[in-house]
Image (tube, rainbow, N blue to C red):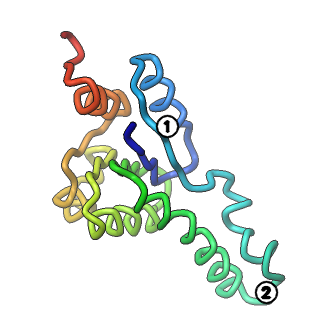
């Protein structure tokens, strides 16, 4: 069973779509992800370690606690999929992609054509760059089952 880490934007349902499509193809995969509850992710540091007066320290505490989960999941993964969404600049997604590449993980990047230039260095580290979730599923199906969509 392969471990797949789903990193990146948290404002759409892309993770559940990929998981569902993979289940429909009977792939034996284990999916890992960051905490996708935005408020929980942002506030875990102050909820656990105490209130902060300054936003910097609130964010600092939360980022470190989230990094414990993220680093462990990426290290335990065979494949890391990173989605860059349309609305926000996802610096955390770029960092996750870099951490995965530094840990020699197979990397699949999802983004629109309009982000090609901005993400060219990340794309260069990836083994596949796609624009659609179904392309990710077809890559995983090929990797797991050795089959193409129409075979």
Q: Which residue is mark 2?
A: 52
- Marked residue nearer the N-terminal end (2 or 1): 1
Which residue does the image show at 44% across and 49% down from the upper left? 5
Which residue does the image show at 20% across and 24% down from the upper left? 146
Q: Which residue is mark 1?
A: 14
Residue 98: give x, y in percent of width and height: 32, 68
Are the two marked residues, 2 and 1, in contact with CB atoms closer than 8 angstroms?
A: no
Identify which residue, 18 or 26, lies in the foreground.
26
Q: Look at the image and tell me in which quarter the N terminus lies.
A: top left
Which residue does the image show at 18% across and 10% down from the upper left? 151
Q: Which mark is residue 116?
A: none
Using a 10 Å C-alpha cutoff, classify the residue at mark 2 as few (fewer than 14 neighbours), some (14 to 19) or many (20 or more): few
Above or below, 85 against 51 in this view is above
In which image quadrant can residue 134 be found? top left
SS at badge 2: loop
Identify which residue, 70 or 57, lies in the foreground.
70
Using a 10 Å C-alpha cutoff, classify the residue at mark 1 as few (fewer than 14 neighbours), some (14 to 19) or many (20 or more): some
Above or below, 37 against 31 in this view is below
Above or below, 48 against 14 in this view is below
Residue 33: give x, y in percent of width and height: 53, 50
């Amino acid at each position: 069973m392969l471990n797949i880490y789903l990193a990146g934007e948290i404002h759409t349902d892309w993770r559940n779509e990929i998981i569902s499509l993979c289940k429909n193809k009977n792939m034996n995969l284990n999916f890992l992800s960051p905490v996708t509850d935005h408020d929980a992710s942002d506030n875990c540091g102050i909820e656990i370690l105490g209130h902060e007066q300054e936003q910097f320290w609130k964010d600092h505490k939360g980022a470190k606690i989230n990094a414990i989960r993220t680093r462990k999941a990426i290290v335990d993964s065979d494949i890391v999929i990173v989605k860059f969404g349309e609305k926000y600049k996802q610096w955390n997604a770029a960092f996750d992609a870099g951490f995965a590449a530094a840990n020699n993980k197979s990397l699949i990047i999802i983004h629109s054509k309009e982000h090609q230039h901005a993400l060219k260095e990340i794309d260069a580290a990836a083994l596949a760059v796609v624009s659609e979730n179904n392309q990710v599923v077809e890559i995983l199906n090929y990797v797991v089952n050795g089959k193409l969509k129409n075979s």
